[in-house]
Image (cartoon, rainbow, N blue to C red):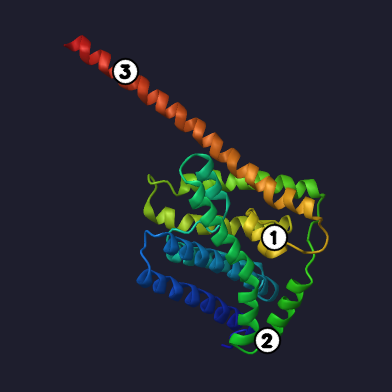
């Protein structure tokens, strides 16, 4: 059976990205203290670079091999991400949440965001280097390179629909993932479900909604500078809306945690009273 050219091209691309990033991680493990800032910066940079660079090739899969292959690729890359991630956030939303709720220091937040934005900035150059230098450029990669360099937004609905989708979508994504990956869940569910869920979300988004990211860094990497959206609207749709949605979900959970603590405190007091009466 002959392997389709775009499938082989994409396979080589993904393997190249994963091998380079994972090889660099192993090198960082050997050269730097794993608890030090330099190591943490490198791990965050490499995790974000792997995520943002592989995203470009997903378009090749979708165009040449169809939506089912696209969904399977998203799931597969999600599993690879879970295996290689280490401690990287790979999105600005989670560290901003941790900072706002007092679980991350300002210096740690700044270091994380600098690593992420540096990786996002270099992602297209990395992808372009693989397409043009790592092996001979194919028609599939020539076409996708042209699309990336002269991109335009696919917004089939009024802009406020897409803004609302980013806001509500990030709320739902965080709400679902935090529950699916809690320590009370089976380890197999925590490992597989996020990849399966996000593959379903993005496949449905591409099919029915258009250019959505549900992550400001991914949006900036893929869409910033594309025709059809002003800078102000870009920030509203792809930065402000998802940040509000994510933080709203975090705030919702924090209210639940406070109620649980109050309930536990009341039960503890009631238990002490019962003990005193029995004495």
Percent of width and height locating residue 4: 62, 84
The residue that label 1 is drawn on is: 206
Label 1 vs label 2, nearer the camera = 2
State the residue at coordinates (57%, 40%). 249
Q: Is residue 98 above or below residue 201?
A: above
Label 1, label 2: how many angstroms apart (C-alpha)? 25 Å
Mark number for residue 44? none
Q: Going from the N terminus, do you reach mark 1 or mark 2 first? A: 2
Number of marks? 3
Q: What is the crowding at mark 1: few (fewer than 14 residues within 10 Å), some, or many (at least 20)?
A: some
Label 3, label 2: how many angstroms apart (C-alpha)? 71 Å
Label 3, label 1: how many angstroms apart (C-alpha)? 53 Å
Q: Going from the N terminus, do you reach mark 3 or mark 1 first? A: 1
Percent of width and height locating residue 233: 78, 51
The residue that label 3 is drawn on is: 269
The residue that label 2 is drawn on is: 138
Label 3 vs label 2, nearer the camera = 3
Q: Helix or strand or loop: what does disc 2 sit on?
A: loop
State the residue at coordinates (57%, 50%). 93
Q: What is the crowding at mark 2: few (fewer than 14 residues within 10 Å), some, or many (at least 20)?
A: few
Q: Helix or strand or loop: what does disc 3 sit on?
A: helix
Q: Is residue 1 above or below residue 107?
A: below
Rendered-image quadrant of the C terminus: top left
Does any portion of residue 72 appear in the rendered image? Answer: no
Q: Is residue 77 above or below residue 102?
A: below
Q: Image quadrant of residue 84?
A: bottom left
Rendered-image quadrant of the N terminus: bottom right
Q: What is the crowding at mark 3: few (fewer than 14 residues within 10 Å), some, or many (at least 20)?
A: few
């Amino acid at each position: 059976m002959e392997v389709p050219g775009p499938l082989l091209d994409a396979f080589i691309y993904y393997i190249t990205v994963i091998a380079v990033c994972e090889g660099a991680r192993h090198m960082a493990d050997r050269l730097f203290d794993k608890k030090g800032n330099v190591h943490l910066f490198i791990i965050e940079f490499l995790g974000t670079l792997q995520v943002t660079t592989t995203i470009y090739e997903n378009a090749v899969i979708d165009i040449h091999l169809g939506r089912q292959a696209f969904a399977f690729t998203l799931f597969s890359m999600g599993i690879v991400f879970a295996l290689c991630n280490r401690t990287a956030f790979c999105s600005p939303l989670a560290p901003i949440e941790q900072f706002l709720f007092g679980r991350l220091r300002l210096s740690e937040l700044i270091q994380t965001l600098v690593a992420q934005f540096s990786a996002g900035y270099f992602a297209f150059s990395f992808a372009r280097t693989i397409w043009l230098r790592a092996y001979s450029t194919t028609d599939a990669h020539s076409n996708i390179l042209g699309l990336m360099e002269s991109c335009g937004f696919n917004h089939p609905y009024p802009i406020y629909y897409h803004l609302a989708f980013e806001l509500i979508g990030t709320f739902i994504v965080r709400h679902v993932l935090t529950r699916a990956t809690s320590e009370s869940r089976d380890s197999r569910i925590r490992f597989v479900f996020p990849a399966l869920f996000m593959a379903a979300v993005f496949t449905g988004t591409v099919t029915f909604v258009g250019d959505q990211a549900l992550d400001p860094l991914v949006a900036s990497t893929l869409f910033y500078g594309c025709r059809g959206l002003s800078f102000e609207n870009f920030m509203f749709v792809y930065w402000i809306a998802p940040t509000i949605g994510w933080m709203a979900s975090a705030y919702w959970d924090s209210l639940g945690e406070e109620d649980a603590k109050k309930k536990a405190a009341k039960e503890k007091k009631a238990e002490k009273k019962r003990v005193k009466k029995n004495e």
